[in-house]
Amino acid sequence: MQAERMLDGKVAIVTGAGGGIGREIALAMALAGASVLIADIGVSLTGAGGSGTPAEQTKQIIEQRGGAAAICAESVGEWHSAQRIVQAALDAFGRIDIVVNNAGILRDAIFHKMAPEDWLAVINVHLNGSFFVSRAAAEHFRRQESGAYVHMTSTSGLVGNFGQANYSAAKLGIVALSKSIALDMQRYKVRSNCIAPFAWSRMTDSIPAATPEQKARVAKLRQMTPDKNAPLAVFLASEAARDVTGQVFAARHNEILLMSQSRPIRSVHRGEGWTPKLIAEHAYPALRASLPPLDRSPDVFSWDPV
């Protein structure tokens, strides 16, 4: 099987495919032989406005390269519009095989200053949107007994970050959603996996670069272009990954990382049970050395992109 045609005959929905990582995934899937439904409403990074131009540009690039693409300008954030996204793929190409949940917005703020509407907006696009589109495709996947979901998570949720309570919560929720899909739909030969992408895009363009150290750091981060995430998405959507489900990967420049999932680290037992005082005196001292530090994503991924 030639790598560039690993998706021959497949139909993929890619949300947020008007730019950045979503566009690169859509382009790569088209080059791999898939027909692509570009689901994008062309909003700003914060979710404001709306334009058909980004989706049209993605479509033109795919078609110029000999691929097939269609556009659906429906929001992922409403159940009925998500159903229309899936129906648009069926109308354009007659089937659906792949869903890439990539659409997202950012409304960063330190937790104690975060407005409720900013929490709700980010949760709705990332987490609710991933559920709505996935759920709309599920009946088709179940009937044909095949299908692949690729969801975008983030190390902001997997590890942590400042000022992103809404985004981090949504992205970690997507991991749990993906695992649930993998468990519930395994009997129908449907797979579900996550990617934590690293890329310089409009979602990372706000990283400060005031000091010489910050400027040097940003210069290295700029090497992580959005297209570096696309090969992993194509692989996970292909039959080459037919045995891969319920997993979380990260793509960082030329690295591919398999991420751990929450499991017990250490335990203590007392046959007579515990009191708060006994926990303080015995359980906590036994567990203390194994407590994970309060890391942020840059602390864990501290080495330069390779």
Image (tube, rainbow, N blue to C red):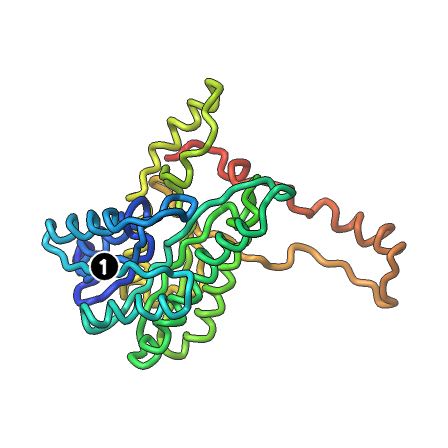
Residues 272 and 232: in front is 232
Residue at the spot 62% in from the left edge and 44% down from the top edge? 111
Q: Residues within 10 Å of mark 1 (few under 14, many from 20)?
A: many
Q: Residue furthest front?
A: 49
Residue at the spot 36% in from the left edge and 66% down from the top edge? 82
Residues 140 and 249: in front is 140
Q: Which residue corresponds to mark 1?
A: 71
In this rendering, is residue 112 above or below 266? above
Is 272 situated left or right of 139 in this image? right
Residue 80: image location, x then y, percent: 38, 70
Which image quadrant for residue 243? bottom left
Residue 25: image location, x then y, percent: 28, 52
Residue at the spot 30% in from the left edge and 62% down from the top edge? 237
Residue 238: image location, x then y, percent: 27, 63
In this rendering, is residue 303 above or below 62? above
Residue 221: image location, x then y, percent: 39, 32
Q: Which amino acid does the dot numbered 1 rest on?
A: Ile
Q: Residue furthest bottom?
A: 143
Quadrant holding the C terminus: top left
Residues 202 and 141: in front is 202
